Image: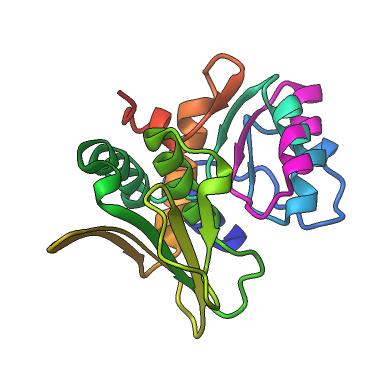
Amino acid sequence: MGRTIREVSEAGGHELCAALDLGDSLYPAIESCDVAIDFSFHSATLPLARAARETGKALVIGTTGHTPEEKEAIRAEASGVPTVWAGNYSIGINLLYFLTGKAAAILGLDYSPEVVEMHHRHKKDAPSGTAEGLVDVLRKTYGLGEEKVSHGRHGLIGERARDEIGVHALRGGDVIGDHTVYFAGEGERLELTHRASDRTVFARGAIRAAVWVRDREPGIYDMRDVLNLKD
């Protein structure tokens, strides 16, 4: 993603001030930029968010796999500067979030919601940040707590509860990212699917978010804010 962001930013006429790897010094680089973009590792986001707050720089967070404790600490730092924080920067995926919320509101729990994602075999976290985002959309639409989310199923577990959200992670090959939300009703099934075939879709979205966020008020935004997809 770092190489792809560099290529996309340069092709779009944006200047890349610095490219950092884990362990590199943050402050000399971040002081020279307008926006810092994070696609790294879960433990690296908090130091970057702290450096952004201390230097007053806008921030775009694309890293996933944070623990609940890390998320809380990152949010405390990132809320002090203009920040876009999203699990997926694809324009199509963020439209999928929007459509998922609309479908869930219309269909209700008479149509059982299930989220299935597939990624390459090297991906370290599961489910994907995008799948978690889709589950969050469903939970908020239905008014359900996290205890209603079922991560896979195994054994003699009984029939599916009506107020349950299933989420399943598949891994293999070189799949960049496939996400499907199923709404399974009696006699019919609705499927909303997005498939990424090129990583540049994420880089283009991240650059778009960086351009959008640099002049915003401090606070945490997501790609639906960037794309004006919120009701």
Q: Residue at x 47, y 38 (%)?
A: 144
Nearer the observer, 151 or 48 = 151
Q: Position of residue 25 (x, y in %)?
A: 87, 46
Measuring 50% from the left and 41% from the top, which residue is drawn there? 14
Q: Quadrant of residue 114?
A: bottom left
Apparent side of residue 69 relative to residue 17 in the rendered image (left or right): right
Q: Which residues are magenta?
A: 50-72
Identify whether 191 is placed above or below 103: below
- x and y percent of residue 106 in the render? 20, 37
Left or right of residue 73: residue 178: left
In-front residue for pair 56/101: 101
Q: Residue at x 47, y 36 (%)?
A: 209
Q: Quadrant of the C terminus?
A: top left
In the rendered image, residue 5, in percent from the top left (x then y), is placed at 53, 54
Q: Going 80% across and 51% down the picture, which residue do you hit?
A: 43
Q: Residue furthest top?
A: 217
- Is 26 within the magenta? no
x and y percentages locating residue 168 in the rendered image: 48, 67
Between residue 156 and residue 134, name the one nearer to us. 156
Q: Answer whether residue 23 is visible to the viewer in this image.
A: yes
